[in-house]
Image (cartoon, rainbow, N blue to C red):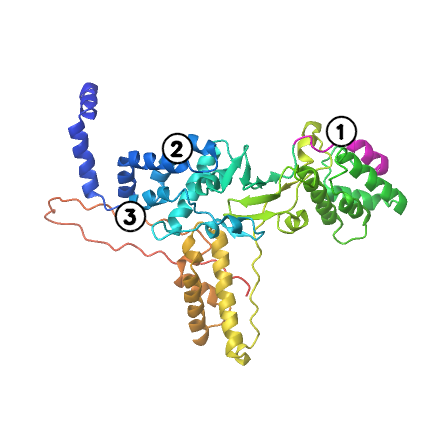
């Protein structure tokens, strides 16, 4: 076919309609058909969206109407759910009080579904809006929350404004501080003065400081002077509101079994209070919200010591081998850590346990297996259905009553509930679409596909 013929064919509206209609008639993909229908009715969505977004507290969100409409079209769900979602934006879908109650929450726990807008649709929309936030040069979680709640607005490029309060939001590896907020130029001089054997060509973090102080074997008075001089210099100019006392005390507790950790905790406390500013209405923020998008979780903090207990290793350097980076890397970075899942301890002879105690162990085992799967597959909301844990608990009870050793139960439960598997399941190829054709005179013999053996991870220690 000549190029001109192809161009003519592409511009032939009747031909295009016929092809599209033909493909639609052959398709049984509900998600695809919903996207097509939503796209064809995008004008209705955009008109309603413009009206609803005008009621939100963040006027900047209104400049992204077309992008938000496209995100709604892309999201899995029926056209009716999308229209209902848009119509409910003025009321909102976020439990704001829960979001700032200080507890850890999976993102889905903060969404408030309705009869017409189910939780799975809201969860999908949150993730669509999250990705849009990054392209809009806003914090991803902040943008999604501001779209889905009239009580929340994006303040600047990352913070949230909830009512009259500013909440600082940090994703994985977010820093508690800002570039050049803390002094760093003379830190090597102070370290060399008190710790002459310290290697300043290396990056000096909490562990390096701890080892160097122990090696120097400073007398108590000199140690106190060192702690005072180092801390006062780093947080110079912020003495009125920076809580530096925990860091000074930590630096002097050389014999503490958690010496390096104590220094990190004290440093985070000092940095948090210095970053927040004055302890009055002029403070920079009311609290800090840590978001972990990998785990789909968040938690709000107003106390840096609580934060320290719920984050991975606090990363910072008193001084860095690359002097140009010292002013950036002396602000501690934090990431909301993955929660530990306790093991379930069965006694050697469970036959002597009372029924209530056994039932408790069955429930704990189900909870352990489900939490492990939830952490591995945080996007799977089916794992968070309360009825699912009841079903898994009942299965564990049946297996135990049948005489199965409790160490073998987890693998068998995962076999019966593949969604609990911690390994990526191989993709299942969709069958080829059926085509109407003349059957051959001698059709080939049908060969059944080979069944793949189930691959199970080793059972956890319970």
Give the residue displayed 75% in from the left and 42% down from the top.
208
**Does residue 322 appear left or right of residue 432 in this picture?**
right
Could you tell me how many numbered marks the image carries? Answer: 3
Instruction: Kindly identify which numbered label has been placed on residue 144.
Output: none
Res. 65 mark: 2
Asked if labels 3 and 2 touch by Cβ distance under 8 angstroms, the answer is no
Q: Nearer the viewer, mark 2 or mark 3?
A: 2
Instruction: Find residue 200 and report its horizontal and vertical position in percent.
Output: 77, 33
Q: Secondary structure at mark 2?
A: helix
Q: Which residues are magenta?
A: 179-197
Question: Which residue occupies the foreground of this view, 239 or 375?
Answer: 239
Q: Is residue 389 above or below residue 258?
A: below
User: Which residue occupies the extreme top position in the image?
Assistant: 4
At 26% across and 42% down in the image, what residue appears?
33
In the image, 400 versus 286, the foreground residue is 286
Local secondary structure at mark 3: loop
In this view, the mark in front (1 or 2) = 2
> Percent from the top left, x then y, of residue 343?
57, 63
Kind of element beneath mark 1? loop
Evaluate if marks 1 and 3 touch, with contact meaning CB atoms under 8 Å apart.
no
Residue occupied by mark 3: 430
Alpha carbon of mark 2 to alpha carbon of mark 3: how far? 36 Å
């Amino acid at each position: 076919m000549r190029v001109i013929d192809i161009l003519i064919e592409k511009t032939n509206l009747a031909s295009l309609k016929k092809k599209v209609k033909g493909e639609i008639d052959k398709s049984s993909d509900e998600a695809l058909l919903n996207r097509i229908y939503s796209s064809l009715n995008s004008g209705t969505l955009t008109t309603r969206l413009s009206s609803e977004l005008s009621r939100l507290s963040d006027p900047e969100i209104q400049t992204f109407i077309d992008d938000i409409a496209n995100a709604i079209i892309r999201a899995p769900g029926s056209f009716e759910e999308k229209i209902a979602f848009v119509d409910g934006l003025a009321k909102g879908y976020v439990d704001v009080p829960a979001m700032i109650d200080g507890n850890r929450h999976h993102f889905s726990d903060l969404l408030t579904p309705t009869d017409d807008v189910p939780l799975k649709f809201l969860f999908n929309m949150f993730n669509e809006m999250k990705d849009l936030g990054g392209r809009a040069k806003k914090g991803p979680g902040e943008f999604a929350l501001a779209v889905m709640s009239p009580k929340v607005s994006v303040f600047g490029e990352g913070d949230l404004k909830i009512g009259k309060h500013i909440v600082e939001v940090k994703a994985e590896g977010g820093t508690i501080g800002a570039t050049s907020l803390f002094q760093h130029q003379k830190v090597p001089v102070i370290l060399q003065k008190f710790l002459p054997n310290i290697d300043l060509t290396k990056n000096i973090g909490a562990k390096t400081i701890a080892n160097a102080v122990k090696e120097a074997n400073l007398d108590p008075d000199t140690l106190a002077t060192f702690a005072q001089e180092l801390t006062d210099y780093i947080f110079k100019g912020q003495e009125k509101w920076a809580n530096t006392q925990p860091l000074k005390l930590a630096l002097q507790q050389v014999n503490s079994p958690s010496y390096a950790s104590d220094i990190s905790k004290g440093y985070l406390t000092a940095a948090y209070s210095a970053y927040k500013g004055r302890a009055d209405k002029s403070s920079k923020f009311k609290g800090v919200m840590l978001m972990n998008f990998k785990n789909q979780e968040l938690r709000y903090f107003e106390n840096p010591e609580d934060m320290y207990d719920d984050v991975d290793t606090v990363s910072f350097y008193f001084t860095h081998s690359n002097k140009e980076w010292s002013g950036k890397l002396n602000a501690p970075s934090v990431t909301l850590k993955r929660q530990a899942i306790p093991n379930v301890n069965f006694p050697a002879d469970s036959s002597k346990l009372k029924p209530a105690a056994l039932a408790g162990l069955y429930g704990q085992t189900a909870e352990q297996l489900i939490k492990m799967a939830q952490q591995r597959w945080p996007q799977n909301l089916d794992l968070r259905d309360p009825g699912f844990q009841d079903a898994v608990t009942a299965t564990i009870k049946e297996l135990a009553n049948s005489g199965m050793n409790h160490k073998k139960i987890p693998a068998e439960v995962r076999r019966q509930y593949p969604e609990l598997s911690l390994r990526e399941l191989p993709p299942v190829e969709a069958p080829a679409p059926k085509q109407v054709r003349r059957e051959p005179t001698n059709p080939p013999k049908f060969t059944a596909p080979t069944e793949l053996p189930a691959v199970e991870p080793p059972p956890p220690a319970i």
